[in-house]
Image (spheres, rainbow, N blue to C red):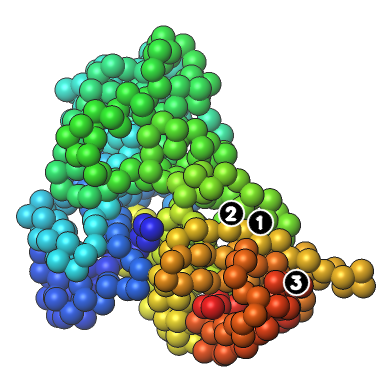
Amino acid sequence: MTVIYEINTLVWLGELSRRYGRHVTLGEVPEEVWDSLVLPGVDTVWLMGVWERSPAGLRIALRDEGLMASFRAALPDVGEADITGSPYCVRNYVVDPVLGGPEGLAAARVQLASRGMRLLLDYVPNHIAPDHPWLTERPDCLIQGSAEDLAGTPDGFMEAGGRIYARGRDPYFPPWPDVVQLNAFSDALREATVATLASIGDQADGVRCDMAMLLMNDIFGKTWGDRAGTTPAKDFWPCVIPRVRARHPGLLFVAEAYWDLEGALQQQGFDHCYDKRLYDRLLHEDAGAVRAHLSADLAHQRGLVRFLENHDEPRVAAVVPGDRERAAAVAVATLPGATLWHEGQFEGRRVRPPVFLSRRPQEPVDELLREFYGRLLPAAAAVRRGDWHPVTPAGWADNDTHRHLLAWTWTHAEARHLVVVNDSDRPAQARLPLPWDDLRGRVCRATDLLTGAVYDRDGDELTDSGLFVSLEAWGCHVLKW
């Protein structure tokens, strides 16, 4: 199953440059650094932010007081040299020379492939930088406006090359000041998107499509109305993805997706879509909400990306530090679907630097948390094989704490595993009915892969009554039977 490790490329290379006392590009990363990315279960490295950033977008960012305040909050000693512009304000889909250019990326891909890992890169389908070549070369790919639009809503439109263009946006927020809106209904854009994604497929093994749901016909039509033109008979992604896959059959498509549109985007061709609903429920709701979410069709769940943080979300150690983070991590690591880990998560980083910055503050390593993830990753890699089966905890008339427990099994010809998570701040007990029908007449031994604890249980009792479990607040078992 896909396990992704996200790296902020510019920050990472900057730290490597300071560590080694020389400018390190993607083509010059030392072998031991690539070796350090070989983590149990991880098969895909997402180098976030490799494309050419926009000088025009940077100038806009430097004038934005709100952005500048966020930079100072994350990096109190921030200087202008630390502000590089947004990697999602793309001037061109060519690897930035500062990072080593296309040759550096090609060398990095070889290094990852030699270690059995794929390379994932970004694509931003909804908007481009205000100095992107398409504003002059392909205006038919963009949403255009009039002089009246610019005069009436200057925050929503801009002038470039004698034309008026709409600024990029989603339907729920004001326009973004540093980007220009592409037109998902334009045949010209669809052709250009196929060519761009095919080019990315020449350089990588997968593509993470930013805010992918914004291009869906229904969403785009509601956002832009008549400005977009006639709604095409075919949706955007079903038009684009098959044509890209004709050139790159194995290219992994990952969608950043919200608003419960994950299933629709899976149907439109994506391999995996962000599971933001699970993120919200694990961090802010209770076990019942999580259990309801996990009742979805298994095929749908296999197409989700489970995560606790990424470059858009706060650091999980800052939101739910301690045992609750560990419980949530056990859940996302052992559920079906893809898993996304964020560089710095294992060390307990608490500051999420805005993506405009090339430097982040120094933070102490949480050694206990790093040791925990050092046990969890190999445990999860061992567990997620075979058939996944949710387990419904049972309680007693005078003890309903079973409702705080989450549980599931993985059954493979070579191994059986049971995962139990107490998703609450109080002790909980339950009986767990196991889905294995050959336990009777045996002594069954369970070893907890997180702690090394060993439990011997009577197979007849397991068959008749289920496994009795008792966990402290936010406690977990990852049991190999």
Quadrant where the N terminus is found in the figure: bottom left
Residue type, numbered disc 1: Val
Residue beneath disc 2? 278
Give whichever of discs 2 and 3 has the lower sequence position: 2
Q: CA distance from mark 1 to mark 2?
A: 7 Å
Residue type, numbered disc 2: Leu
Query: Which residue corresponds to the image point at 51% horizontal and 37% vertical from the top-left?
Result: 263
Residue type, numbered disc 3: Asp
- From the top left corner, tell me how far across and down residue 293 is, in percent: 64, 50
Q: CA distance from mark 3 to mark 1?
A: 27 Å
Element at badge 1? helix
In the figure, 325 relative to 162: above or below?
below
In the figure, 443 relative to 353: above or below?
below
CA neighbours of label 2 inside 10 A, class few (<14), some (14 to 19), many (20+): many
Query: Which residue corresponds to the image point at 54% horizontal and 84% vertical from the top-left?
Result: 447
CA neighbours of label 1 inside 10 A, class few (<14), some (14 to 19), many (20+): some
Residue beneath disc 3? 464
For the residues bearing labels 1 and 2, Cβ distance under 8 angstroms: yes
Query: Which residue corresponds to the image point at 35% horizontal and 73% vertical from the top-left?
Result: 40
- From the top left corner, tell me how far across and down residue 37 is, in percent: 27, 72
Residue beneath disc 1? 290
Answer yes or no: is residue 53 visible: no
In the image as oriented, which residue stretches furthest toward the front?
Answer: 441
Closest to the observer, 188 or 326: 326
